[in-house]
Amino acid sequence: MADLKKTREQNKEGAFFVDSSCIDCGTCYWMAPDTFVNKDGQSAVFQQPSSLNEATSALRALYSCPTFSIGHKDKSPLDKEVEASFPFPIGDPKDFIYLTGFHAENSFGATSYFIERKGPEGPKNILVDSPRFFSKMAKKLYDRGGALYQFLTHRDDIADTDRYFKAFSPLGKTKRIIHQDDATKDPLKSYEIILKGFEPYQLDSETVIIPVPGHTRGSCVLLYKNKYLFTGDHLAYSLKLKQLIAFKRACWYDFNIQIESMKKLLDFSFSYILPGHGAPFGTTQEKMKKELEKCIQWMESS
Ligand code: SF4
Ligand SMILES: [Zn+2]
């Protein structure tokens, strides 16, 4: 829980506050941009919510904050309602894509996603990266059929993958997926599917995993229905620059190789970017291609 005694002085006085434990992961900046902003290297409330929508977004950020740094002094039934609303839908409702919330500190607050889908033999859900372990969330996902796959974009965002894997184990079907080049230690080396090489890997008829070395050597993105690209830390959208970006200062392997990996994505079609860090971004397929070309030019000149 956020500590009122450690409230940052940069907060605007009112019901919501941020304490000094914030790690500046950025989640609340895009999840509730009308309430939170970076001030002096950490989050602060710059404006208290003044509508139900703003209060709901601020509470979503509160429940997603990896370090429990956001506090709310005037609890109401809305608090419980918002907590219960996770996982909540994103994108086209008929595609059943969800944000899980409850980000984990050990993945620096990375976003994880849940794809809910059914096949003739039962649920074929995919958990992309991992939220922090939260028993209510594990039960909700279990009740929806658990995950046929737990796909990891790269080694930084593993968080509580193994605890969710264990929670889903009575269903007896989950496979964890990671690229060999990021599976450098136990237990990652013993995950059920270890990807090798750099060719796209067709997971099933509507899902392809594309290795994109650069941010890490084993980074991969997952393309679903030629529409949603789950990008981990390979590709993100900057609300400030209003364009697609890559994280040059947080590139752990090779930025030039990351540029080549980015070019590979021009061969694929998608209209949503669902990143590990930063706001999801959606547009038309045509505009996304142009945005990607612009991002590549920006990377080459940076
Ligand atoms: S979500 Fe939490 S840790 Fe991340 S920037 Fe906001 S207050 Fe800080
Ligand atoms: Zn990373």
Image (cartoon, helix red, strand yellow):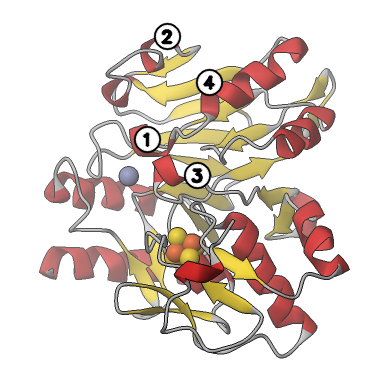
Q: Are marks 3 and 4 in contact (CB under 8 Å)?
A: no
Image mark for residue 104: 3
Ligand 1 within 8 Å, label 3 CB: no
Pinpoint residue 211: horizontal percent, then vertical percent.
Answer: 35, 34
Q: Which residue is mark 2?
A: 190
The type of residue carrying mark 3 is Ala
Task: Please tell me whether mark 2 sits on a helix, a strand or a loop.
Answer: helix
Task: Please tell me whether mark 4 sits on a helix, a strand or a loop.
Answer: strand
Residue 123 higher or lower than 207, as above or below: above
Q: Are marks 4 and 2 in contact (CB under 8 Å)?
A: no
Q: Residue 221 falls in which quadrant of the image?
A: top left
Q: Earlier in the sequence, mark 3 or mark 4?
A: 3
Distance from Cα at disc 2 to Cα at disc 3: 22 Å
Q: Is residue 278 visible to the viewer in this orientation of the structure?
A: no
Q: Earlier in the sequence, mark 2 or mark 3?
A: 3
Q: Which residue is drawn at the image coordinates 43% and 48% (left, top)?
A: 231
Distance from Cα at disc 4 to Cα at disc 2: 9 Å
* Crowd class of label 1 (few under 14; some 14 to 19; many from 20; radius 10 Å): many
Horizontal arrangement in the rendering, residue 164 relative to residue 214 (left or right): right
Task: Please tell me whether mark 1 sits on a helix, a strand or a loop.
Answer: loop
Q: How many marks?
A: 4
Query: Which image quarter holds the N terminus?
Result: bottom right
Image mark for residue 176: 4
Q: Earlier in the sequence, mark 1 or mark 2?
A: 1
Q: Which residue is mark 1?
A: 154
Ligand 2 within 8 Å, label 1 CB: yes
Q: Earlier in the sequence, mark 3 or mark 1?
A: 3
